[in-house]
């Protein structure tokens, strides 16, 4: 049984790039992938946090490196990707986790052209253009995994979330389109749509007892998410176990969208 699990879910010998890895979902998913055996390259703006996470992963016996960079600067994506490809000697990049994102939570009348462009760029354009930098190598090896981060707002409209919701609705279609373009090369492309998890992006929810309780009560399970709840789906989408799953968005939300 152990051999079966290792063959299907183990990530030994695989290399992954995780954006937004300095905090929140990206940080947790980097830890999960390393725990399953992958070598991980962490990308975010905050170098101190990246250094600390690299130390933590390396102390657990896994290989890790970081590239401190601002992904919102699209003209730099090619150079950032090049640094990722050579960050760990002998490691090829077999998968990309696009966890970097922003939610400005602006009232609809306050959304400007600049804030709209900033949100749509980081949440929707960057996952495509950054991932595409790695597709050539994946095609050559006939293996790849792309994991995008969608949202409850991919399918639900929340107050003060118009631009964010538009970007995350786009992530679902982007994921399907990526799958159509690349899955013939054994590159699967799927998205995780988290419910309410305690991260920097959800501080406004979790710091307020009323909204925190509302979010928990809105689920079928009756509680908010804990980061470890994402371990199984992260490893599944990253491993051989999901070889025939592509173009899908899976809500990990305790049944929030089921009600």
Image (cartoon, helix red, strand yellow):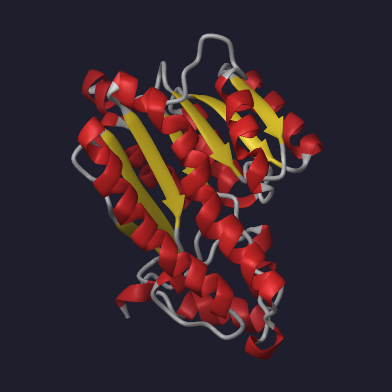
Residue at far front of view: 75
Q: Residue at x 71, y 24 (%)?
A: 55
Quadrant in the picture for the C terminus: bottom left
Of residue 198 and residue 81, the one placed in the foreground of this image is 81
Of residue 160 and residue 141, the one placed in the foreground of this image is 141
Query: In this image, 82 relative to 156: left or right?
Result: right
Residue 43 in view (yes/no):
yes
Quadrant in the picture for the N terminus: top left
Residue 204 in view (yes/no):
no
Spot occupied by residue 241 in the image (x, y as percentages of width and height): 25, 34
Query: In this image, 189 relative to 85: left or right?
Result: left
Q: How many marks?
A: 0
Q: Residue at x 36, y 26 (%)?
A: 138
Q: Residue at x 25, y 48 (%)?
A: 180
Spot occupied by residue 72 in the image (x, y as percentages of width and height): 67, 51
Spot occupied by residue 80 in the image (x, y as percentages of width and height): 64, 33
């Amino acid at each position: 049984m152990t051999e079966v699990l290792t063959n299907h879910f183990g990530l030994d010998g695989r290399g992954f790039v995780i954006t937004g890895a300095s905090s929140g979902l990206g940080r947790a998913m980097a830890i999960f992938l390393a725990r399953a055996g992958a070598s991980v390259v962490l990308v975010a703006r905050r170098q101190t946090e990246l250094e600390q996470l690299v130390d933590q992963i390396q102390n657990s016996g896994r290989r890790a490196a970081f590239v401190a960079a601002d992904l919102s600067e699209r003209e730099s994506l090619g150079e950032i990707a090049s640094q990722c490809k050579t960050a760990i000697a002998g490691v090829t990049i077999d998968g990309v986790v696009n966890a970097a994102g922003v939610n400005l939570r602006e009232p609809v009348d306050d959304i400007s052209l600049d804030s709209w462009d900033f949100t749509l760029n980081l949440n929707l354009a960057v996952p495509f253009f950054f991932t595409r930098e790695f597709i050539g190598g994946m095609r050559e090896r006939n293996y790849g995994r792309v994991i995008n981060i969608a949202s409850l707002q991919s399918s639900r409209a929340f107050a003060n979330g118009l631009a964010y919701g538009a970007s995350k609705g786009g992530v679902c279609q982007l994921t399907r389109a990526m799958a159509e373009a690349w899955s013939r090369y054994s590159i699967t492309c799927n998205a995780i749509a988290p419910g309410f998890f305690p991260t920097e992006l959800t501080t406004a929810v979790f710091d307020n007892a009323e909204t925190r309780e509302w979010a928990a009560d809105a689920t079928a399970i009756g509680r908010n998410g804990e980061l470890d709840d994402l371990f199984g789906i992260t490893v599944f989408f990253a491993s051989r176990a999901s070889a025939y799953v592509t173009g899908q968005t899976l809500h990990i939300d305790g049944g929030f969208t089921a009600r």
